[in-house]
Image: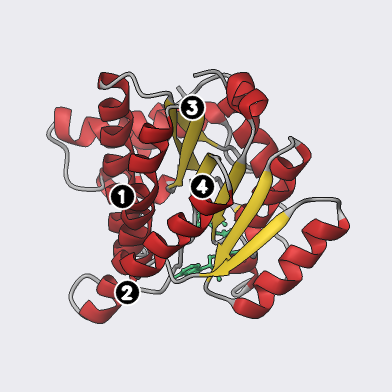
Amino acid sequence: MAWNDIKSAGGLAVITGGASGVGLAAAHHLAKEGFDILLADIAEEQLITAAKGLRDAGATVHTAVTDVSDAGAVTALAQTAFGLGPVAVVMNNAGIGIDSDTIQKPEVWRKTFDVNFFGILNGVQAFVPGLIEANRPSAVINTGSKQGITTPPGNPAYNASKAAVKVLTEQLAHELREMSAPVDTHLFVPGFTYTGMIAAVMPQKPDGAWTSEQCVDYLFGRVAQGDFYILCPDNMVNENTDARRILWGAGDIAENRPALSRWHPVWAEAFSAFEKG
Ligand SMILES: NC(=O)c1ccc[n+]([C@@H]2O[C@H](COP(=O)([O-])OP(=O)(O)OC[C@H]3O[C@@H](n4cnc5c(N)ncnc54)[C@H](O)[C@@H]3O)[C@@H](O)[C@H]2O)c1
């Protein structure tokens, strides 16, 4: 399904985690493209402020305070959305990053998976049957992370939750393709982007980070090209570097290297040469 067909058919764009960061920037972008917006977020005050900003910019906006980790709440969100009219875009985007550790804090793993993975699964299961039944051009955009692909040491619960989002989204794309449903699927992977999540730990935007608007412009440029994997660069990492890092990570298995060899001192030089490749 071409993005132009989805835009021509029009309808509602539903965005979770829409009160801040890339979700809010996506709402502004989609409103400018002619979609009505249903903004969902757990943070009520930010949601009100975000909706006001969108309305001031001329958008038609609905809001729903929603905790994406609650399947019943996401089902209610879908009922609200389909009740408002045809749904054209579902962006399952809400996410959190809490410090985690492999050998302790199981509650952090559960919380992270509840929001980052089950939040997206809830969105897929609440909306996609209705999109298939509607049989009109639409798109599902799930927000993953490079940390779910190259899994750098540091926050294993976040990485694992985002790796699960990648698997889910790939399978969803396959199933929708097999049934010839007019529903496109995209895995959206921001680079380092200065959003609420990053501002919580870095009060000033680092030079290396992109803005949410840059990230979202890149996203919809690639959506328009019909791409499934949409990995955004940033001011430190370009597309080629991402590709080399992904290839190196896959090579750990194919070449029988130690786990996460990219961060293994013995492999540091070989990785560095490969990355430049
Ligand atoms: N910023 C980055 O560098 C970066 C990089 C890769 C991936 N991402 C992903 O992008 C997505 C958006 O994050 P962001 O960077 O814009 O951060 P952000 O903190 O600005 O926005 C996230 C939004 O999600 C909302 N949210 C959190 N828990 C929720 C819940 N249970 N239910 C509903 N809403 C909830 C928050 O209130 C917030 O408005 C996340 O999935 C994040 O993991 C961000």
Measure the C-alpha gap from mark 3 to mark 4: 17 Å
What is the residue that sits farthest to the left in this orientation? 256
Quadrant location of residue 45? Answer: bottom right
| Residue 47 in view | yes
Give the answer, above or below, for where 125 lies relative to 273. below
> Is 255 above or below relative to 43?
above
- Disc 2 from disc 4: Cα separation: 21 Å
Q: Which residue is mark 2?
A: 111
Q: Residue 86 location, x and y as percent?
A: 55, 40
Q: Nearer the viewer, mark 1 or mark 2?
A: 1
- SS at circle 1: helix
- The local secondary structure at tag 3 comes to loop
Residue drawn at the location 54% of the way across and 29% of the way down:
239
SS at circle 4: strand
Residue kind at label 2, given as amino acid type: Lys
Distance between the alpha carbons at the discs numbered 2 and 3: 35 Å
Which numbered circle lies on residue 91?
4
Q: Which numbered mark, 3 or 4, is in the foreground of this view?
A: 3
